[in-house]
Image (spheres, rainbow, N blue to C red):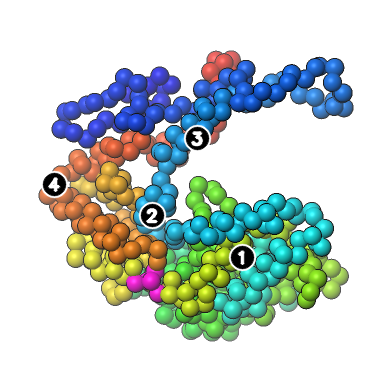
């Protein structure tokens, strides 16, 4: 059913099999079906009264606008309603459990937000004289110090703006170090279970990617690894704990083999939340690792919000890390340009990185303290193991034994039910829960990856677990349509994901424009 704007209308209620209570307005309950802002806006309307500027105003040197800007005009109340209505269709960590594995969606303490909004951090500009931003530079220096302490690695590049950007920074640093030694190599080894950004980063840096098989315990196959590592390999990219939620037990042996071949050991540190305060990557022989401040150290993420992916480096790589960095004892200075004596490869960003995220992350670190961060890691692992233990008898855990920060299940428990991983996840939405990560990692069939993080209480986990147990029972009882037709209660019914990927509509076209194009 299409509504006025020709978009799919609000969903039917999930009553009896034939019951349809589609409303004639497209609205539902107290939730409005919200059109695009361009569909409701009128260029003639404005939220503020501004005096008309006469056309004979001082000339703008040829920069005057030649045609209307095309912004939607709305009164202030209508604009507020538009965004509030959209926000009610959204799901967020502040609404409920967000069990996405590999994403570390944890509570963002309001204290962080308060700190990030202090005028001394919020209202400064990267081009301000350094003498006026000494506090901000001090904060960056302090954050660097915390990251050095937590990882046991001397080099810190703060500027990368997300995990994937950190990976790029790490591999560019490795390339610079190898080229400086006159030994530019061609190959990067990446385990099969790696996050998609790892092989993408290696390819982006011009390396050939060779995959390393996983063993039946969900870890890197050490024999296959030893087979693949030789003097043509520039780096190995490994995630630890890995994307199956498991600790790579052979990491010391792997590091030794990497170094014996003259290669560098890159670790994807996006899962650092499971080990911070417990293990220092520097002690494991890792040469470079990015940290997702927006996962491990709270700070909001998702929806394309700002990220921050600092990279830490070993002694061997630190000289090649990119500018800028903070230096000086009392008068702090941002070392911005690659000087004659510098071996830094260049820079990753125009300025120094995401200040707001630095503030939030440091607020998280300082309010927890070193012991508190360690406890956060332990609680995150405990919570994941609780989920694994309490669902292990009805769902099918992919590997034996305890997990680290996330619990991995495959779809064997749905065999012969006619319900797929996707259907199961969609049915969770109708029951009030955001789905877990689906179909990742690729090394298990129909994967369901659950990461509760440390911020969930036992009661919220119990509610989640009971809901999943109930859904499993329903699937086994043959109530297939409850799954295949889900979600029935979300703002949108199931979307055609194949079509969305193959024929994406990325831009709204005004009706007049669409007509003119025909
Ligand atoms: C999230 C994640 C990344 C990428 O981080 P972004 O900030 O999204 O670029 C890389 N690897 C792993 C294992 C991750 O979980």
Which residue is tagged 4? 478
How far is mark 2 from mark 4, CA to CA? Answer: 28 Å
2 or 4: tag closer to the N-terminus: 2
Q: Residue at the location (60% across, 73% down)? A: 147
Q: Picture coordinates of residue 265 (x, y %)?
A: 57, 75
> In front: mark 2 or mark 1?
2
How far is mark 2 from mark 1, CA to CA? Answer: 24 Å
Which residue is tagged 1? 310
Ligand 1 lies under 8 Å from the Cβ of mark 4: no
The front one of 312 and 254 is 312
Q: Secondary structure at mark 4?
A: loop
**Proximity of marks 3 and 1: CB atoms separated by less than 8 Å:** no
**Placement of the N terminus among the 4 image quadrants:** top left
How far is mark 2 from mark 3, CA to CA? Answer: 22 Å
3 or 1: tag closer to the N-terminus: 3
Q: Is residue 33 left or right of residue 427?
A: right
Task: Answer yes or no: is residue 223 visible.
Answer: no
Which residue is tagged 2? 98
User: What are the residue bounds of the magenta stretch?
Assistant: 378-382
Q: Is residue 112 above or below residue 319?
A: above
Which residue is tagged 3? 83
Q: Is residue 380 magenta?
A: yes
Among the 4 quarters of the image, the one containing residue 160:
bottom right
Q: Residue at the location (65% across, 71% down)? A: 142
> In front: mark 3 or mark 1?
3
Q: Is residue 50 above or below residue 291?
A: above
The front one of 507 and 296 is 296
């Amino acid at each position: 059913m299409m509504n006025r704007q020709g978009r799919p209308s609000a969903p039917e209620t999930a009553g009896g099999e034939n019951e349809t209570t589609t409303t004639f307005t497209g609205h539902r309950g107290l939730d409005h079906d919200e059109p695009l802002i361009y569909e409701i806006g009128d260029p003639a309307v404005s939220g503020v009264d501004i005096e008309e500027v006469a056309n004979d105003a001082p000339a703008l040197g040829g920069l005057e606008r030649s045609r209307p800007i095309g912004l939607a005009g709305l009164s202030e109340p209508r604009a507020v309603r538009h965004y509030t209505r959209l926000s009610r269709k959204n799901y967020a960590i502040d609404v409920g459990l967000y069990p996405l594995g590999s994403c570390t969606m944890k509570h963002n303490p309001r204290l962080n937000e308060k700190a990030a909004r202090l005028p001394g951090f919020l209202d400064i500009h990267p081009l301000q004289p350094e003498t006026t931003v000494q506090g901000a530079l001090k904060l960056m220096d302090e954050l660097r110090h915390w990251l050095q302490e937590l990882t046991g690695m001397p080099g810190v590049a703060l500027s990368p703006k997300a995990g994937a950007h950190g990976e790029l920074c790490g591999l560019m640093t490795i390339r610079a170090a190898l080229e400086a030694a006159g030994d530019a190599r061609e190959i990067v080894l990446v385990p099969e279970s790696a996050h998609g950004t790892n092989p993408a980063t290696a390819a982006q840096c011009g390396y050939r990617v060779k995959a390393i098989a996983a063993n039946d315990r969900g870890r890197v196959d050490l024999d296959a690894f030893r087979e693949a590592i030789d003097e043509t390999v520039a780096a190995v990219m490994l995630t630890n704990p890995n994307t199956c939620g498991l600790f790579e037990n052979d990491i010391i042996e792997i590091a030794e083999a990497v170094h014996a071949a003259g290669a560098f050991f890159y670790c994807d540190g996006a899962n650092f939340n499971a080990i911070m305060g417990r293990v220092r990557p520097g002690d494991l022989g890792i040469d470079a690792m990015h940290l997702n401040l927006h996962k491990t150290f709270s700070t909001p993420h998702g929806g394309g919000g700002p990220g921050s992916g600092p990279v830490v480096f070993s002694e061997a790589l630190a000289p090649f890390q990119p500018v800028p960095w903070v230096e000086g004892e009392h008068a702090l200075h941002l070392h911005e340009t690659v000087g004659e004596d510098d071996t830094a490869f260049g820079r990753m960003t125009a300025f120094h990185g995401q200040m707001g995220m630095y503030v939030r992350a440091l607020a998280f670190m300082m309010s927890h303290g070193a012991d508190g961060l360690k406890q956060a890691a332990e609680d995150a692992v405990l919570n994941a193991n609780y989920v694994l233990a309490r669902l292990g008898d009805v769902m099918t855990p992919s590997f034996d034994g305890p997990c680290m920060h996330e619990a991995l299940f495959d779809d064997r428990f749905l065999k012969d039910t006619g319900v797929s991983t996707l259907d199961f996840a969609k049915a969770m939405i109708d029951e009030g829960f955001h789905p877990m990560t689906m179909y990742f990692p690729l090394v298990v069939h129909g994967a369901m990856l659950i990461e509760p993080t440390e911020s969930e209480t036992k009661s919220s986990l119990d509610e989640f677990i009971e809901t999943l147990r109930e859904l499993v029972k329903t699937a086994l009882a043959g109530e297939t349509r409850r799954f295949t037709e889900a979600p029935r209660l979300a703002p949108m019914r199931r979307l055609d994901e194949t079509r969305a990927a193959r024929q994406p509509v990325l831009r709204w076209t005004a009706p007049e424009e669409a007509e003119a194009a025909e």
